[in-house]
Image: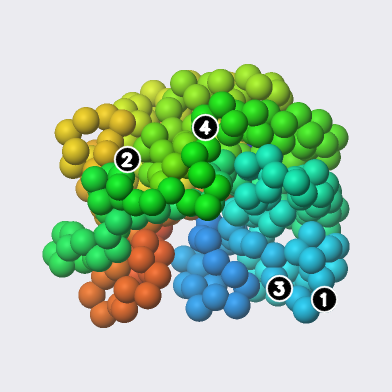
Amino acid sequence: MKANRRTFIKRSASLAAVLSVGGMHAACVDSETRQAAKEVERDAGMKFALMMGPTSPRVPYARQMDVLHAVSGVQRIDGLDPWDPKAIAATKAAWEKEGIKWTVVEGPPSLGTLTKLGLPGRDEEIANFITFMKNLKQHGDVDVICYNWMPVISWARTTMDRPGRGGALVTSFNNEDIKNRRITEYGEVSKEALWDTLEYFLKAVVPEAEKIGMNLSLHPDDPQVDSIQGISRIMNTVENFDRMLNLVPSKYSGLTMCQGNFALMGADIPVLIRRWGNDGKINFVHFRNVQDISGVLPSTEFTETFHDEGQIDMYEAMKAYHDIGFRGTIRPDHVPTMAGEENTRPGYMTLGTLYAIGYMRGLAESVSKQERRI
């Protein structure tokens, strides 16, 4: 996932200077060096991606923007489980037809309530998850599986149409609005229980991931509150992520740097990127901005924002990814719904996503060129 980009550029420049008197050979080397430097600069060496399926109306936009990586699930094919080799191969072929490389699965199949709550049937779920990993490596291009440890209640917001900048609609969360909701059918689920089930899962799957080179990438709880309707949350602090990384230490057990959630935990995002990134723990990035409106951290009330507003210094975040040599997949996340769009999928509409990609590319080009001036 990492490479020392600054050393590479300096070596390339020195090589070109030494060979500059060598005629055609030097010209060829210089041309190759310029091309290599250009490739390093494009998106700061990262894999810009969109979350979409092969038949999504976003695909033409992705090609036109030169965003040629996808975060995608497996296509549904009648009679086939999503971990079946034929389903995975068909999904890869569909992406290849579009000229886009499928690199990340987000929200994997066969990892649900049974596993996260330790209920009967979890061993079968875990076995299917391992099969899914192996078939992804053998029949697809995916090298990252992004998963979460939020049983029963996953991503949650209390408002889906809060007015944002210029009347754009954003999602927001206020813990006061949900704290008195009834507990779920699973009753009170303790933090200790979730730590036990997470460790059980990691002990089963990490050794298998090591054998095939699959990167497991745990996403933080969203929202990062203490509990929702009796279901505790454990991936809601930086310290707990450090604890998770030490449960079954492995280069293939890492995390998804979802900037918004970690910022709402109170983390300094560029500092955290460098700390975990230099340890090789960041496998996947959700490039996203938020604003705490509760006045306390961890935040109990917050709102999503456009990428160029909010509390995170996005330039410094992009510079941190560049400085650690992150070369993995990075995608925009949780964008506003803009004028002319129906708010049919809050946080994931098209216009805000296109705006976010342009903003990200500008930041990436800026940090790349800034380094070359040093």
Query: Disc 2 marks which residue?
Result: 314
The residue beneath circle 1 is 79
Where, quadrant-wise, is the N terminus in this rendering? top right
Q: Is residue 302 visible?
A: no
Residue 190, disc: 4
Tell which tag, 4 or 1, sits nearer the viewer.
Answer: 4
Indicate the position of residue 84 as horizontal and vertical percent values: 83, 63
For the residue labelled by badge 3, is the local secondary structure a helix, a strand or a loop? Answer: loop
Q: Are marks 3 and 1 in contact (CB under 8 Å)?
A: no
Read off the residue under disc 3.
Answer: 76
Where's residue 242, x and y in %?
A: 53, 21
| Precedes in sequence: disc 1 or disc 2 | 1
**Residue positioned 27% across, 39% down in the render:** 300
User: Amino acid under label 3?
Assistant: Arg
Find residue 373 and report its horizontal and vertical position in percent.
37, 31
Q: CA distance from mark 1 to mark 2?
A: 45 Å
**Residue 136 falls left or right of residue 286:** right
Mark 1 lies on a secondary structure that is: loop
Mark 2 residue crowding within 10 angstroms, few (<14) / some (14–19) / many (20+)? many
Q: Is residue 142 left or right of residue 18?
A: right
Depicted 280 relative to depicted 118: above or below: above
**Position in image of residue 287 (x %, y %):** 42, 46
Q: Nearer the viewer, mark 3 or mark 1?
A: 1
The chosen color scheme is rainbow
